[in-house]
Amino acid sequence: MNPRILRTSFVAAPLLVLAYGVIRILDGLDGSRGPGLAWTTGHLAFIAALILFVPIFWQLRRMAGRDTVATVSAVTGLAGGAAFLAQFTIDIVVGFMAADHAAMGPLFDRVQSIPGVSPVVYGVGPALFSIGQLALAVQLAFLGRVRAWVPVLVLAYSLLPLIDKDLIPLSAVCLLVSFVPLARRATVSAPVAPGAVRT
């Protein structure tokens, strides 16, 4: 892939997550979230971030040496991204179908009552996104291709929204900082020899 596109993806993806987090907070200032412009815009921002994570995962896999562990981690992350994509697409559709916030609840209940949807789209599925990303970051740190603080920030990015979803903007900043050294190395055509620590 074009190195410029890769570098842009590493920066744009966290910024789009940040945008989603900020819009989400603003959307809730009136006491409820959705439906409406803020709901739709925020979700579209996150979906755009998910699309950018496709080249990001494959770049991380390449940096890790394209071995079995890296490939499984990348595929795991992409599977989680697909679950997130399904979840956010459902959210947007429900937002368009509902007349107001109160009407969204029954629509969500109807969707989640479909067998398999709740665990795949709202449970285990999205968790795979963070697991795959963290696994790749840890592998890169173990190989000496990124600093040890990179997986720490990736872990913070994953955990902060679990504590409080209003921390999504902060988690996005953690992700952006962790991606800076990866964006700088997006032009590298081959994996670095083990022990060559990236800055």
Image (cartoon, grey):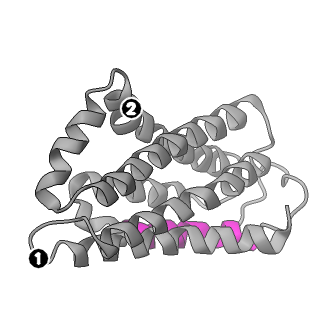
Amino acid marked by disc 2: Val
Q: Which residue is mark 2?
A: 124
Instruction: Verify whether residue 173 appears in magenta.
Output: yes
Amino acid marked by disc 1: Asp
> Which one is in front, 117 or 175?
117
Image quarter where the N terminus lies is bottom right
Magenta stretch, residue numbers = 171-184
User: Looking at the magenta stretch, what is its main secondary structure?
Assistant: helix
Which of discs 1 and 2 lies nearer the camera? The answer is: 1
> Which one is in front, 168 or 157?
168
The residues bearing labels 1 and 2 have C-alpha atoms spaced at a distance of 31 Å
Image quarter where the C terminus lies is bottom right
Give the class, few, some or many, for how many residues have Cα within 10 Å of label 1's Cα (few <14, many ≥20).
few
> Percent x, y for residue 83?
47, 40
In the picture, residue 56 is in which quadrant?
Answer: bottom right
Q: Secondary structure at mark 1?
A: loop
Q: Which residue is mark 1?
A: 30
In the picture, residue 27 is in which quadrant?
Answer: bottom left
